[in-house]
Image: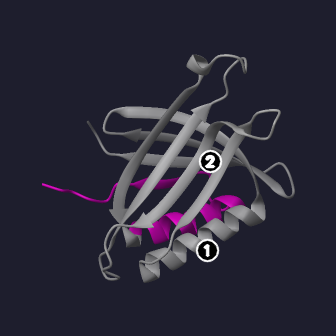
Amino acid sequence: MGTDKFSISADLSEEYEVSLDGVINVSGFSGFGNGYFNRLDVFEFCDQAKVLSETMEGRAEIIGTLGNQDGSTFLETFSIRIYPLSTSKLNGVVGVHITLGDYPSTDCREEEKRKVSCEMKTRNQHLLKFSEDIRKLLSGEITIATLDKGLEFN
């Protein structure tokens, strides 16, 4: 099926806000999504991911949604949730649950929503590099931050 991979690019044209575009391919499932975030929230997510990768405790998440008029969530368009799957700080395994969705052309039909939601398992060292790369992405040092699976369960 190829290598599992999640890539993020960013539109940095706004001073305090960032648009993150994600593309994922995991075990033959693929999709894309976009979310708008306050830059400080993305930096906080990177800090949480770094701490998790070093301590193998806690959680890190960033959630971008499209909302209904009443304030409820209509569709998650770009979400990353990270959690430890083992406690080893040396060679730990983390779960990275990613949800990406595409904006439907209308808000009226549930069937019109397109999204992919899946988990990647990776090593804590890969998570640390990914969080550092997202910081570099926001500063304009790189154009794409990528998380590869980094695990082989044979």
Q: Nearer the viewer, residue 2 or 70?
A: 70
Number of numbered discs visible in the structure rendering: 2
Tell me whether circle 2 and circle 1 mark residues in contact (CB < 8 Å).
no
Residue 81 percent across, percent down from the top left = 52, 57
Q: Is residue 110 above or below residue 149?
A: above
Quadrant containing the C terminus is bottom left
Which mark is in front, 2 or 1?
1
Badge 1: few (under 14), some or many (20 or more) residues near its Cα, within 10 Å?
some
How far is mark 2 from mark 1, CA to CA?
Answer: 19 Å
Chain part drawn in magenta: 126-154
In the figure, 107 relative to 10: above or below? Answer: above
- Residue, disc 2: 9
Give the SS element for disc 1.
helix
Residue 51 x/y as whole percent: 53, 79
Q: Is mark 2 on a helix, strand or loop?
A: strand
Quadrant position of the N terminus in the picture = top left
Q: Look at 62% across and 40% down and name the residue there.
A: 76
Answer few, some or many: residues within 10 Å of disc 2's Cα (few below 14, many 20 plus, some between 14 and 19): some
Q: How is the image coloured?
A: one colour
Residue of label 1: 47
Q: What residue type is labelled 1?
A: Asp
